[in-house]
Every structure is written in structure tokens, then in C-alpha cells.
Amino acid sequence: MKGFNLVANSLVGLACLGMIMPQVTALAQSPSTQFAQKIQIADIAVPHGVLKGKVVNSQGQLQTGVVITASLHGALVCQVVSNEAGEFALSNLGTGLHEFQAGEAISTVRLWRSAAPPSARSNILLVSDSPARGQILSHRIIGMGTLTTAVVVTGAIITAVVIANDDNNETPASP
């Protein structure tokens, strides 16, 4: 009976902890903020306002006839179609953050007319389809953070050990 009370109290404690933990992790940082921090924006130098590039699929094969659009602050700047070699050229581009859409995929790049950083490239490679990506089980599928998962697993192990070590060999007392 003593072991049963310990297990029951442990489960109540874990339930209370489970109600508190998701709120704490939700206040720390939202998933959209975490995703936004992982986006890397490429710098591209376009000294004459013309950007040349190629379109490939996720296997690296050149794509012909893909419509490429360039947008600045949500407004369409220009649109072209890739040729037989998967190449395209966009003209009349200004500076700043532009979104390029090729097929299903959207890429964000920073265009520079002058004083581009040394790491800036002179052309762009767009992927027309986006490959499927794996997810981390503990956060994406189960919906729990790493700390919460560790607490739940530790509680389950402690509960199993308590039940296995429970000496319930006491003879019942008759009234």
C-alpha cells in the first residue's frame, strides 16, 4: 500500500508539472520566431540591375519553362520564363530584400547595386520544388519540449522501479 501511495503521488506531481511546463516553454519563444531565426538570406550583387541565374529541381536537374517572379515588399517587380538550358535573366531590379518564386519554392535574397559585401554572389540558383524534410520527434510530433520529455520519461522509469520493488507480501489482517 505504501508503494501505491508513492506511485499515486508521483503521478499527481508529474501531471502538475506537465501543466506548468508547456506554458513556460511557450513563453520562451514561439515556433515562428525559431523558424525565422534559421532563415539565411543570400547577398547578390546586381551592379546594372540585371540578375542572371539558373533553375533546377531538388535532384539538381536543369528545368525549362519555369516561371520565375521577383517581388519587392509584396509587389510584383518582374517575371520571366527559364529557357532550354534552365537559365533566366531578370532586369530592372532595385536593391533590398526580394522574393523570387520558381515553381513551388520561394527564396528571399538581398540585392545590392553598389557596395555589396565581399561574400555577395553575382548570380542565383533557384530550386523549383521543395524537398520533404524530417522533423524532430520530441518537439514537432509529440508536441513536448526536450525538458518535458525528459521529465515524463524519468517519471515513467521511477514509477516502473517503484512497482517492481513493491513488497506486497504482507498477510492481510482479518477483522
Image (cartoon, helix red, strand yellow):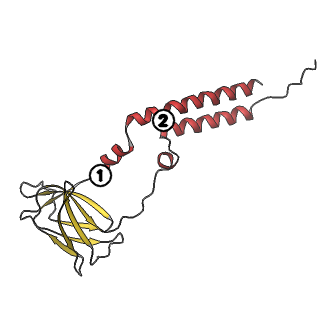
Q: Is residue 63 above or below residue 16?
A: below
Say which quadrant the C terminus sits in: top right
Which label belongs to residue 124? Answer: none
**Element assignment for label 1:** loop
- Who's the residue at 15% across and 71% down the image? 89
CB under 8 Å between discs 2 and 1: no
The residue identified by callout 1 is: 39
Mark 2, mark 1: which one is toward the viewer? 2
The residue identified by callout 2 is: 22
Residue 161: give x, y in percent of width and height: 69, 34
Residue 20: give x, y in percent of width and height: 50, 30
Q: Tell whether 167 sits left or right of 26.
A: right
Say which quadrant the N terminus sits in: top right
**Residue type of the residue flagged with mark 2:** Pro
Q: Mark 2: give few (<14), some (14-19) or many (20+) Cα within 10 Å.
A: some
- Who's the residue at 59% across and 31% down the image? 15
Q: Tell whether 63 sits left or right of 115.
A: right
**Residue type of the residue flagged with mark 1:** Ile
State which quadrant residue 95 falls in.
Answer: bottom left
Residue 137: give x, y in percent of width and height: 50, 50
Of the two numbered discs 2 and 1 on the same chain, state the one appearing first in sequence: 2
- Who's the residue at 10% across and 55% down the image? 116
